[in-house]
């Protein structure tokens, strides 16, 4: 099996006019010396610190989107399942309110009124599903990649 | 070094639990270092700014507890259950400690096992067996590469998912000169060996109880060992 270079735990920055010694293989001027296997192995890995090794501290957010994501992760106490349940309950409450409003104003007295109510509730439901689908698609696209 | 003087088993295991940062751990470093050392019967400990390390002489066993991750490593475990028993012992103990938490918001739970299985033949023979029994080039691929090309080395990073979680694997024939790259020790390796590494992990991003964490670690460890046994049997034996 091709021998990959040892994975580095912290990036090293050196400036020198000494020739760069590559770990192996043909490389260009911008190459870091990492092999394909090393990139595969380090992409998502279970690791343990070396005894006494001080690990680098976490990075600050690079910009507003990352800051917002951190805020939502740490401040919003609800899981995605809870949010879905709350949305469904709110949808039921809204349709119920709509029913009460229409019934109070006499719209539901005949068949035509009931059909119109059903159309309204259906339109609002479709809108909710479409919006939910779009949000889910966006979240999936912007989610960090799994290994 | 000949195979007679090589260690009969070479393996390393690490379990790492990453969780939402818990600053209270920093308040208990001293007390916990002694308690964990006594509980796991690991005589040495070291405290650095955001983590405690508890380890055996020679660091063949090492437990660590920090403000955002905790875990356990072991090298050259003699049996299938050794690592599982020690790792679950650590985590069961941690969940009894005040301020560690009865449930943790787990970002990642992973277990990586590495194995080296002695092969009594030559490196070329093992390469051929590996290419024939584990990762086989199709005739079309062999033609595309060139009928006059000879395979001299092979490695296979393959990633999978099953009911337990994701698992990333790396496998391939290894010579004695290459093996120290993958293990912490520098000697005791055979001339030729089959290297197999498997990293099982989940990224739940939700609260997990101690019981769930312990059962997941147990499942990962047992399955990693079993997979290595089956693959070593497939490639090396028979």
Image (tube, helix red, strand yellow):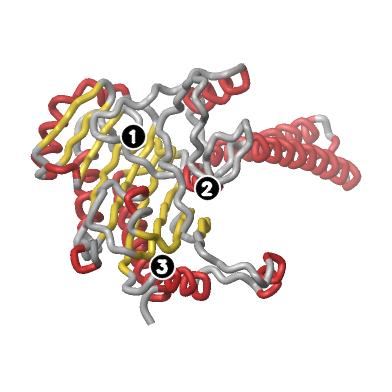
Please give left or right for residue A138 compared with residue A13 in the image: right
Q: Give the residue displayed 55% in from the left and 46% down from the top.
A: A25
Element class at badge 1 = strand
Q: Give the residue displayed 70% in from the left and 36% down from the top.
A: A138
Nearer the observer, disc 1 or disc 2? Answer: 2
Nearer the observer, disc 3 or disc 2? Answer: 3
Q: Which mark is residue B69?
A: 1
Element class at badge 2 = helix
Labels 1 and 2 share a subunit = no
- Spot occupied by residue B61 in the image (x, y as percentages of width and height): 19, 46
Name the one closer to the observer, B45 or A39: A39
Question: Which residue, as the protein is rendered here, is positioned at the far bottom?
Answer: B238
Q: Give the residue displayed 33% in from the left and 48% down from the top.
A: B213
Q: Where A24 sits versus B31, above or below?
A: below
Label 1 chain ID: B
Q: Where A79 sits versus B200, above or below?
A: above
Q: Are marks 1 and 2 in contact (CB under 8 Å)?
A: no
The quarter of the rendered structure image containing the C terminus of chain B is bottom left
Label 3 chain ID: B
Q: Earlier in the sequence, mark 1 or mark 3?
A: 1
Name the one closer to the observer, B141 or B79: B141
The quarter of the rendered structure image containing the N terminus of chain B is bottom left
Q: Quarter of the image holding residue B173?
A: bottom left
Number of residues whose C-alpha sits closer than 10 Å to that of mark 3, classed few (under 14), some (14–19) or many (20 or more): many
Which residue has dot 2 on it? A40
From this viewpoint, is residue B212 visible?
no
| C-alpha separation, residue under disc 1 versus residue under disc 3 | 39 Å
Q: Which mark is residue B123?
A: 3
Number of residues whose C-alpha sits closer than 10 Å to that of mark 2, classed few (under 14), some (14–19) or many (20 or more): some
């Amino acid at each position: 099996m091709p021998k990959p270079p040892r994975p580095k735990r912290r990036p090293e920055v050196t400036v020198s006019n000494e020739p760069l010694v590559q770990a192996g293989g043909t490389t260009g001027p911008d190459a870091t010396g990492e092999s394909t296997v090393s990139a595969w192995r380090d992409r998502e890995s279970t690791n343990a610190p070396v005894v006494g090794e001080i690990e680098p501290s976490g990075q600050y957010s690079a910009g507003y989107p990352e800051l917002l994501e951190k805020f939502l992760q740490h401040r919003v106490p609800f899981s995605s399942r809870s949010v879905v349940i709350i949305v469904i309950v709110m949808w039921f409450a809204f349709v119920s309110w709509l029913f009460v409003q229409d019934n109070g104003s006499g719209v539901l007295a005949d068949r035509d009124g009931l059909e119109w109510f059903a159309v309204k509730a259906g339109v609002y439901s479709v809108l909710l599903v479409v919006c939910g689908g779009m949000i889910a698609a966006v979240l999936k696209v912007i989610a960090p990649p799994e290994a | 070094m000949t195979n007679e003087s090589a260690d009969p088993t070479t393996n390393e295991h690490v379990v790492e639990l990453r969780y939402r940062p818990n600053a209270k751990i920093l308040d208990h470093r001293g007390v916990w270092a002694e308690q964990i050392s006594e509980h796991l019967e690991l005589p040495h400990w070291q405290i650095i700014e955001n983590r405690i390390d508890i380890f055996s002489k020679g660091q063949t066993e090492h437990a660590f507890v920090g403000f955002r991750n905790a875990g356990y490593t072991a090298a050259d475990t003699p049996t299938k259950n050794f690592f599982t028993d020690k790792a679950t012992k650590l985590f069961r103990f941690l969940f009894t400690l005040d301020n560690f938490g009865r449930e943790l918001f787990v970002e990642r739970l992973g277990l990586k096992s590495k194995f080296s299985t002695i092969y009594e033949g030559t490196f070329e023979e093992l390469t051929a067996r590996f290419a024939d029994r584990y990762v086989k080039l199709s005739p079309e691929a062999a033609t595309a590469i060139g009928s006059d090309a000879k395979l001299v080395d092979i490695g296979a990073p393959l990633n999978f998912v099953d009911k337990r979680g994701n698992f990333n694997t790396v496998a391939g024939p290894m010579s004695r000169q290459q093996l120290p790259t993958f293990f912490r020790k520098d000697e005791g390796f055979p001339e030729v060996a089959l290297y197999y590494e498997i990293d099982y992990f989940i990224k739940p991003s939700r609260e997990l109880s101690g019981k769930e964490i312990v059962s997941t670690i147990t499942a990962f460890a047992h399955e990693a060992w079993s997979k290595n046994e089956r693959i070593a049997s497939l490639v090396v034996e028979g």
